[in-house]
Amino acid sequence: MNAAHNCSALETKSASGEHLDLSDAFGEFMTTFEAFKDSNNERLAQLERRGTDVVTTEKVDRISRALDEQKRALDNLSLKKVRPVLGREGGRLAYSEHKSAFEAYVRNGDDRQLRALDTKAMSYGSGQDGGYLVPDETEMEIGGRLSALSPIRSIASVRQVSAAVLKKPFAINGPAVGWVGETAARPQTAAPTLAELQFPTMELYAMPAATPSLLEDAVVDLDQWISSEVEAAFAEQEGAAFVNGDGTNKPKGFLDYATVAEGNWAWGKIGYTLTGDSGELPADDPSDVLIDTVYALKAGYRQNANWVMNRKTQASIRKLKDADGNYLWQPPAAPGQRAMLMGFPLVEAEDMPDAGADATPIAFGDFARGYLIVDRTGVRVLRDPYSAKPYVLFYTTKRVGGGVQDFDAIKLLKFGTA
């Protein structure tokens, strides 16, 4: 079967969701990538001879879209493997006292046990809302799933706090250190210049709705149901904020900070390299600008660095080769792993901008050192059986903050000339 027919069959199967299991989906993804390479090699050969044939270009783009769809399906299958079932394991009610009390509140609004446990949540800034803290198991489940669903959270540093704001001091001129002999006098070092970064936590909410029959079903684990309902909404909202958030009632995204050409980099700004062409990669040796971006990052940061871009940008990068004819983009080595670009993992963040004049659609850096996410402990749920009868709404909130903590750890590729 030729590459075109093979790709068509794979596209159909991907669209209909007929993947039998994760290994089958991964095998189909790798087959499609081989078809993509064959077709793109044909396109490049035509370009060298007489110019690209329109049919060949459309074929490459179609296979590239199929790769994106199959990668998305592969990611979803990987997530489903770690998603908990909604039924109770073994039919046993092995719950903590808090969990049992919380279930009584969720199912029928009986909050007497929660009141007795004195676990009523204090709402920072909106005390009139009320609500109750979810059990620790549910909070951990939500946090664990967010790490898998939220692209920036999966590579950034995450810290839990009990206060509304995390304040982090840092030395602008570096630590005060020096070399001395074992018995020599210790000369006085220069006093460090200290500054303070602040990471306030902002309220993020979701409002899943349940039917009376769901609440009456004793087999359904309502803690896990709430986790599964809010995780996607939380991940989508915080993912956008970690990239583009302006810091007003939301975290401050790394693209919202001031940027500067790498040669003029200073603390408090994100450095960038240039493509040299407005709105696009250069036509000649486009891989060179990616190499420049890699080596704009200091060696100590490169060992744990990741690329961050959206699928549309990734599709254009996927067609590039190095000087030896090897593709810069490589598929995941195994299900659940990330694609690689020039030897570094590639993280898909759909909130990254598309290529355009003076846009920065590609980021590269050690996000674990560069970006800090602050989670305030406690997820609160308020049961509302009145606003959307006969449905019962569960107003679920958590407090999240975020911002750049090391401005030298993240670099951008700017599609421009200055």
Image (cartoon, rainbow, N blue to C red):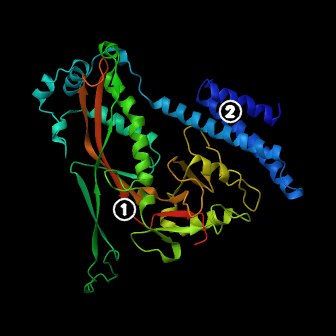
Instruction: Give the position of the C terminus as an image quadrant.
Output: bottom right
> In the image, is 125 to the left or to the right of 321?
left
20 to 54, vertically: above or below: above
Instruction: Give the position of the N terminus as an image quadrant.
Output: top right
Which residue position holds label 1? Answer: 405
Q: Residue 231 appears in which quarter of the rendering?
A: top left
Which residue position holds label 2? Answer: 28
Residue 267 at x, y percent in the picture: 40, 72
Farthest residue to the right: give it.
49
Q: Which is more N-terminal, label 2 or label 1?
A: 2
Residue 144 at x, y percent in the picture: 38, 38
The amino acid type of the residue labelled 1 equals Gln
Q: Residue at x 77, y 43 (%)?
A: 58
Q: Residue 212 appears in which quarter of the rendering?
A: top left
The amino acid type of the residue labelled 2 equals Glu
Instruction: Name the secondary structure under disc 2.
Output: helix
